[in-house]
Amino acid sequence: MSAVDISTTSLREAVALETRPARPSAVATSFTFAWRALLKIKHVPEQLFDVLVSPVIFTLMFTYLFGGALAGSTNAYIQFLLPGILVQTIIIVTVYTGYTLNTDITKGVFDRFRSLPIWRPAPIVGALMGDTVRYTIASVMCIGLGLLIGFRPAGGALGVIAGVALLLVFAFALSWIFTILGLLLRTPNAVMGVSMMVLMPLTFASNIFVDPATMPSGLQAFVNINPVSHLVTAIRGLMGGTAGWGDIVTVLISAVIMTAVFAPITMYLYRNRH
């Protein structure tokens, strides 16, 4: 028997299986794709640029540009602003969920994923789980900077952690909207542009920067029903030690509704994408 035949026989014996491997569970597959998302950050660390730099720019810019004019001092304004700027920062970062999904689609990666014998939503759910790590990093950056320039949460560490946890739940739910855009639009740049058009009214027409009481009545009506405003109010309450269950429950209900509505639409588009 030649060396080639021996090598081929050895290779066949090495890969031969007596029994068919068990199909991976939905949880295991989702965590595998979440790990893939983290590995992408490891190999392309520039992906963290937005979560490391954006919190610094937004926090410093709004605090020192508007703090004296709106609250009399930057120290007073940072107590009001930081929970809101934290929300704005994380919500903007959620745009990259749809952006990276569309990038994978344009490169043909997701066509390969759809051909695998795995739980069909796993690539998207895993990507969202991986993005949650990005949201956490951005939150730490924003809160850490706020503490350095004078933010003092009356709710203590527990209130801050609870506020961040609530924000991550909401961000995960909101990300489903941008996955839909990632599946519908043709290019990553189009996803980014349309997503920003959706986010600008939600973030700026809210209670992030100023008290809605100073706004015209028509704008106040929109701000009062804006889910971002409810999120900011709940997080301000948690960090300030004054949170009411009504605000927290409202945010959780909003997150459940967004997930229940947009997650099935995402999966329908994913299954039927040609």
Image: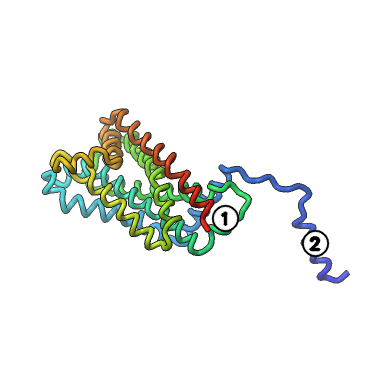
Q: Identify whether 204 is placed above or below 245.
A: below
Colour scheme of this structure image?
rainbow
Describe residue 250's horizontal placement relative to residue 179 as left or right: left
Q: Identify whether 117 is placed above or below 236.
A: below
In the rendered image, which quarter contains the N terminus? bottom right
Sequence-wise, which precedes: disc 2 or disc 1?
Answer: 2
Q: Residue at x 26, y 37 (%)?
A: 233
**Which residue of the protein is positioned furthest toward the top in this rendering?**
245
Is residue 218 or residue 155 the one in the foreground?
Answer: 218
Q: Are marks 2 and 1 in contact (CB under 8 Å)?
A: no
Task: Estimate the x, y position of residue 223 in percent, counting from the top left.
Answer: 23, 41
Q: Circle 2: is it few (<14), some (14-19), or many (20+) Cα within 10 Å?
A: few
> Residue 69 has which mark?
none
* Number of the front mark, 2 or 1: 1
Q: Label 1 amino acid?
A: Phe
> Residue 113 has which mark?
1
Task: Estimate the x, y position of residue 28 in percent, counting from the top left.
Answer: 58, 44
Q: Is residue 211 visible?
A: no
Assign a secondary structure to mark 1.
Answer: helix
Describe residue 27's horizontal placement relative to residue 163 as left or right: right
Name the residue beneath numbered marker 2.
Answer: 10
Describe residue 218's horizontal placement relative to residue 230 as left or right: left
Examine the image and state in which quarter residue 6 appears.
Answer: bottom right
Q: Label 2 amino acid?
A: Ser
Q: Circle 1: is it few (<14), some (14-19), or many (20+) Cα within 10 Å?
A: few
Q: Is residue 74 visible?
A: yes
